[in-house]
Amino acid sequence: MVSVAARSSLLYVNHPEWRVGDSYMRLSGTSMATGIVSGTLALVLEANRTAFAGAPPLTPNAAKALLQFTALKVHDERGTEYDTLTQGAGSVNPAGGVMIGASA
């Protein structure tokens, strides 16, 4: 995941191989993903509330299932897909999460 970097941080200074452009870094882990996943979930909940007005809200387990079901599989640099223990459900897919229940 690419995010804004603190240019004076030890990670930025000591790991130029993780830099993307002048002010960003590519890192992984829950601290990098928290904002993206929580924002995606907010969009999913809003879309569900709009599409199904008056219906009960999504349960926590249903919301989690939507995020997991629409996750994109993660691959290494050779294109080999990571196993579930390495990648979890995959990379969050905001467009997929919002599109659940939409008709074509």
Image: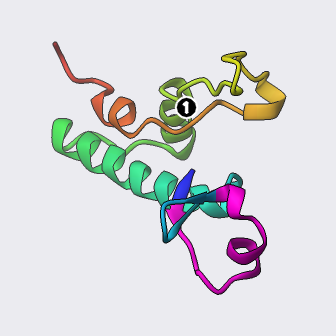
Q: Quick one: 11 or 31, which is closer to the camera?
A: 11
Residue 15 percent coordinates (x, y): 75, 65
Whether residue 8 sits left or right of residue 46 in the image: it is: right
Q: Residue at the location (53% across, 26% down)? A: 72
Task: Single out the residue that lies furthest toward the bottom.
Answer: 8
Part of the protein shown in magenta = 3-18
Residue 99 figure quarter: top left
Q: Residue at the location (51% across, 36% down)? A: 67
Q: Residue at the location (20% across, 36% down)? A: 52
Report helix, strand or loop for mark 1: helix
Q: Colour scheme in the image?
A: rainbow
| Vertical position of residue 22 compared to residue 81: above or below | below
Is residue 10 one of those drawn in magenta?
A: yes
Q: Quick one: 60 or 90, which is closer to the camera?
A: 90
Q: Amino acid at mark 1?
A: Ala
Q: How many marks?
A: 1
Q: Quadrant of the C terminus?
A: top left
| Vertical position of residue 62 compared to residue 31: above or below | above
Residue that numbered label 1 is attached to:
65
Q: Quick one: 102 or 17, which is closer to the camera?
A: 17
Whether residue 2 sits left or right of residue 104 in the image: it is: right
Whether residue 35 sits left or right of residue 32 in the image: it is: left
Q: Residue at the location (17% across, 44% down)? A: 50
Q: Quick one: 14 or 86, which is closer to the camera?
A: 14
Residue 11 percent coordinates (x, y): 74, 72
Residue 28 percent coordinates (x, y): 69, 52
Is residue 17 one of those drawn in magenta?
A: yes
**Is disc 1 surrounded by few (<14), some (14 to 19) or many (20+) residues within 10 Å?**
some
Task: Single out the residue that lies furthest toward the right.
Answer: 85
| Vertical position of residue 14 compared to residue 101: above or below | below
